[in-house]
Image (spheres, rainbow, N blue to C red):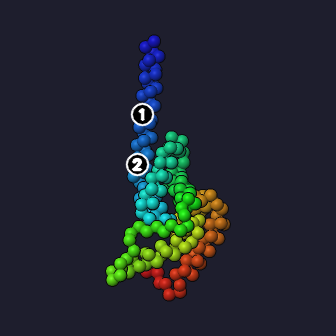
Amino acid sequence: MTDIVSSEAGWNFSWRRERVARDEEFAAFVAAATPRLRRTAYLMCRDWHLAQDLTQLTLAKMYASWGRIWRTANLEAYSRRVLMNAVFDQRKRRSDSEVLLADLPDQPGQLVAPDADLHVTLMRALAALPVRDQAIVVLRHWEDHSVDTVAEILGVSASVVKMRSMRALARLRELLGADFVRQ
């Protein structure tokens, strides 16, 4: 009888040890990945609060699957894929008439730094693109991922990434105008 009890206690102890190791690994992943995920989400939605919500949603979904993916999956790519799906889902739910602003609009007479003007101009041009094209531009040119990596994250072929990237960049050039100078 004592052999059965000690056997169950040993199994229970090893299960707890593995659970603690998984949770520690997840905490380390969260600490490392959160800034990257939040930045990517912000570039996609231009709202820090919504970006934080999308990041938290991504991390919650990953934690729910963590026992299955923590040792086998490419966690960076997996997290980007989950985030992009969350962004796409959020875009489907949001009303087209809704306008998101992180801050109140500038008041007349306030001076705006040149870098802020450049940032606002680029963000507005990026916002004019369809959401999939935004994702391609952000992942490919802001986060500097390869065509193959972006294709894997978005679940499309490499040729689709190349074609949509080319069209999105042409649209950005059109929106920004010929006199736009990259600083």
Q: Residue at x 48, y 69 (%)?
A: 99
Tell me if I can see residue 74 in this picture.
yes
Nearest the camera: 105 or 8? Answer: 105
Could you tell me residue 156's position as x and y percent? Answer: 64, 60
- Callout 1: 10 Å neighbours few (<14), some, many (20+)? few
Q: Quadrant of residue 134?
A: bottom right
Label count reads 2
Circle 1: element type? helix
Which residue in the protein does label 2 denote?
28
Question: Looking at the figure, which quarter contains the N terminus?
Answer: top left
Nearest the camera: 61 or 72? Answer: 61
Three-letter residue code for mark 1:
Arg
Instruction: Work out how far the residue at label 2 is from the one at label 1, CA to CA, in angstroms.
Output: 17 Å
Left or right, residue 165 beside residue 101: right
Does label 2 or label 1 sit earlier along the sequence?
1
Tell me if I can see residue 77 in this picture.
no
Q: Quadrant of residue 120?
A: bottom left
Q: Which label belongs to residue 88?
A: none
Question: Looking at the figure, which quarter contains the C terminus?
Answer: bottom left
Is 179 situated above or below 47?
below
Q: Residue at x 44, y 17 (%)?
A: 5
Could you tell me residue 128's position as x and y percent? Answer: 55, 73
Which residue in the protein does label 1 denote?
17
Three-letter residue code for mark 2:
Ala
Left or right, residue 37 beside residue 166: left
Is 31 situated above or below 139?
above
- Callout 2: 10 Å neighbours few (<14), some, many (20+)? few
Query: Going by the picture, which residue comes out furthest to the left?
Result: 110
Q: Residue at x 38, y 71 (%)?
A: 104
